[in-house]
């Protein structure tokens, strides 16, 4: 897992052909907006979260975020334990995101 800044996260994401955006917030938080093209898997869903994470391609690069960076750090740690090679945590999370946002 790597904790990376908003700027570094955006740059890596932009230039990564194997990038997958992963939003681990709740449905309620998603309703406030999300980063376009993000896959949503709520970390609070326990075993369902684990099942969905295990279905993902471990060879891809995952750019993970939550509201402030805590839950996404947990998600990255879990992913690393499950054999994912590249999981990047967005420091500051969605709260500090300066890029494009999609509203439902």
Image (tube, rainbow, N blue to C red):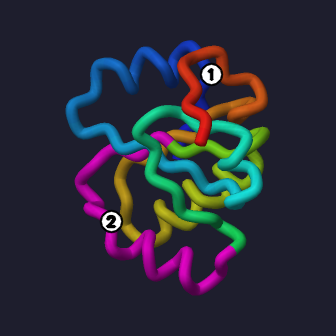
Q: Secondary structure at mark 1?
A: loop
Q: Determine which quarter of the picture holds residue 3.
A: top right
Q: Nearer the viewer, residue 69 or 39?
A: 39
Q: Is the residue 71 above or below the residue 51 in the image?
A: above
Q: Is the residue 88 above or below the residue 11 in the image?
A: below
Q: Determine which quarter of the picture holds residue 26.
A: bottom right
Specify few, some or many for label 2: CA neighbours under 10 Å numbering under 14, 14-19, or 20 or more.
Answer: few
The C terminus lies in quadrant: top right
Of callouts 2 and 1, which one flags the residue occurring earlier in the amino acid sequence? 1
Q: In this rendering, would 102 be left or right of 95? A: left
Span colored in magenta = 45-63
Q: How far apart are the two marked residues, 2 and 1, measured between alpha carbons? A: 24 Å
In the image, what residue occupies the spot 51% across and 24% down?
9
x, y (%) of residue 42? Answer: 62, 65
In the image, what residue occupies the spot 49% across and 69% down?
81
Q: Mark 2 or 1, which is nearer the eye?
A: 2
Q: Which residue is mark 2?
A: 56
Q: Is residue 9 magenta?
A: no
In the image, what residue occupies the spot 52% across and 47% down?
1
x, y (%) of residue 53? Answer: 44, 70
In the picture as drawn, the residue positioned furthest to the bottom comes out as 47
Q: In this rendering, would 28 be left or right of 38? A: right
x, y (%) of residue 30? Answer: 66, 49
Q: Which residue is mark 1?
A: 5
């Amino acid at each position: 897992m790597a904790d990376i800044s908003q700027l570094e996260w955006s740059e890596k994401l932009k230039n990564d052909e194997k990038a997958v955006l992963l939003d681990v917030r709740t449905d309620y938080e998603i309703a406030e907006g999300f980063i376009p093209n993000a896959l949503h898997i709520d970390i609070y869903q326990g075993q369902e979260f684990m099942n969905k994470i295990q279905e993902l391609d471990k060879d891809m690069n995952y750019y993970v975020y939550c509201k402030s960076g805590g839950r996404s750090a947990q998600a990255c740690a879990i992913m690393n334990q499950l054999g994912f090679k590249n999981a990047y945590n967005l420091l500051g999370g969605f709260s500090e995101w300066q890029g494009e946002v999609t509203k439902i």
